[in-house]
Each structure stands twice: as structure tokens, then as C-alpha cells.
Image: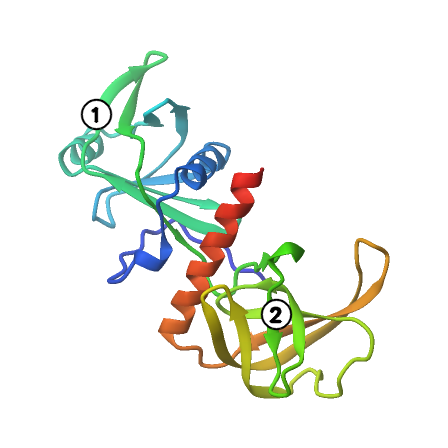
Amino acid sequence: MQHQASLEPVFLSHPDPYLIHDPVEIDYLIHALQSHEAICLYPARHREPFFISALLLIGSDYLLFDAAKEEWINALLLKHGLMCVGVVRQVKVQFSTSECQLVAYDGQPALRIDWPTEILRLQRREAFRQDVPHYEELVCLSLQGQAWPIQDLSVDGLGLLCQGNEPSEFKPGAIVHGWRIVLPDGELEVDMQFRARKEIELRNGNQAVHIGCRFLKLSDAKQDRLARYLTQLQRRRLSQE
């Protein structure tokens, strides 16, 4: 079962691995938020009060949000700044600004902020994994040094692609230790459990087996490395769209 990301804000002591600064990706996330049915606004650095809003207009260097019906809530946003929380493809996105203006838009009150320079993107471990393009040539090495292509990846686990003879160790429930993901910045050692086996058909028509794996007790440092790689992967994908 896939968990829905909430519209509650998060306050991380070490947010750097989850911060997006790339203008191309920020532009993508902002436009994705505009089409989302619900956005929640808060005073910056506060959990309440809050209200459901909508992104009314995306300007060249500013954003306009639907204002709150209660004037006292708008007054708090003007005093403290605005924090926006939304969801894009099951992933929480959040950004804040220290300044906020109350303006008129189509005869109704609206909240104007400057274009954000960074966005926090926080994905639950249980959320979807990112597909790994074949040109990444990302592999996972077994203890015997055999390289298995990685078809999808998250900070929670990965999917291996098996073509031809399937090793006997690829059984749901089996646990392996010391396997290594070959990332661009070096190898990352993981312990993992094989969770699911599914026969699939590749784009070229060939048959293969997808082996779903879950990491076991992955350290925060290793999760951060995977998060950075996944961010870079998505940036490259967005730049090509």
C-alpha cells in the first residue's frame, strides 16, 4: 500500500540532503503545485494556524496564492512570512519566504511572495521509487562481484533486473550482506532482503525478472548519499524534458 504524503510542515535539523536549488527543478515543482488540488499555507516556521489555498498565478519572479478568508490569519503571514506545503507525485514539497504581501487579484485578496530559491522535497521511504534510466548503467555488485542492473531505486530499497539464469539466492525473504551499489561518487555497501519477484517484459520485447529488495538498517549517512544521487538523477531527467 502506498502512503499519501501529508500537508503538515516538517522541520528538519539537517535539511541539506533534501533541499532543491536547481532553477529547472524548482520551476518544474512550482508548476506541478499549481495543478495540485490542495496546498496548505502556514505562517513561516509555525505549525498553525493554517488554511487550504491555491496557487493562482506564476509570475516571472513571484507567486500569487489565494488568501485566507480570516483577516487575522493573513495578518500573521504578513508578519512572519509564508510557508507553503504541497504534494507532487506523492512527495511532500515545502518552501518558505520571510516576506509576504497582500494584493488584489481579479478583485479578490491574494498573497504575493518572491519566487523561492530553494525547495524542500521530502519523500517517505514507503513512497514510489525512481526508475533508473538505462544510460545511467547503475549496478549492484554481489559478494562474488557479479553486476546486476538496478532498474529502480529509493532510500528504502531497489529493484534488480535479472535476464537469463536466475540465481537461487534470489528468493523472497532471503537476506544478503555486503552487496555494493556502484554510485558515481563511489561504492555504497548495503545489506538487503529480497522481497518480491515479478516477471516483466522489457521494451525490446525480451523477458526478464524484477527482484524487489529492501535495505536493512541503512545508516543516515548512506541514506543521505542515496538521496543526493536521486536528486541529481531527477535533475538530469528534468533538464532533458
Q: x and y percent of residue 83 in the render?
A: 28, 41
Q: Is residue 188 above or below residue 111?
A: below
Quadrant housing the N terminus: bottom right
At x 17%, y 31%, the residue is 78
Q: x and y percent of residue 42 in the render?
A: 27, 42
Q: Is residue 146 above or below residue 132?
A: below
Disc 2 residue crowd, few under 14, some 14–19, many 20+, Cα 10 Å: some
| Circle nearer the N terminus (1, 2) | 1
Amino acid type at circle 2 is Val
At x 21%, y 34%, the residue is 73
Label 1 – label 2 distance at C-alpha: 50 Å
Q: Residue furthest left?
A: 79
Between residue 149 and residue 77, name the one nearer to us. 149
Q: x and y percent of residue 178 in the render?
A: 53, 86
Foreground disc of the pair 1, 2: 2
At x 36%, y 72%, the residue is 221
Q: Which mark is residue 101?
A: 1
Horizontally, residue 222 falls left or right of residue 89, namely: left
Which structural element holds mark 1? strand
Between residue 122 and residue 163, name the one nearer to us. 163
Can residue 133 be seen at all in this image of the molecule? no
Q: x and y percent of residue 36 in the render?
A: 49, 37
Which structural element holds mark 2? strand
Q: Which mark is residue 139?
A: 2
Horizontally, residue 62 falls left or right of residue 34, namely: left
Disc 1 residue crowd, few under 14, some 14–19, many 20+, Cα 10 Å: some
Quadrant housing the C terminus: top right
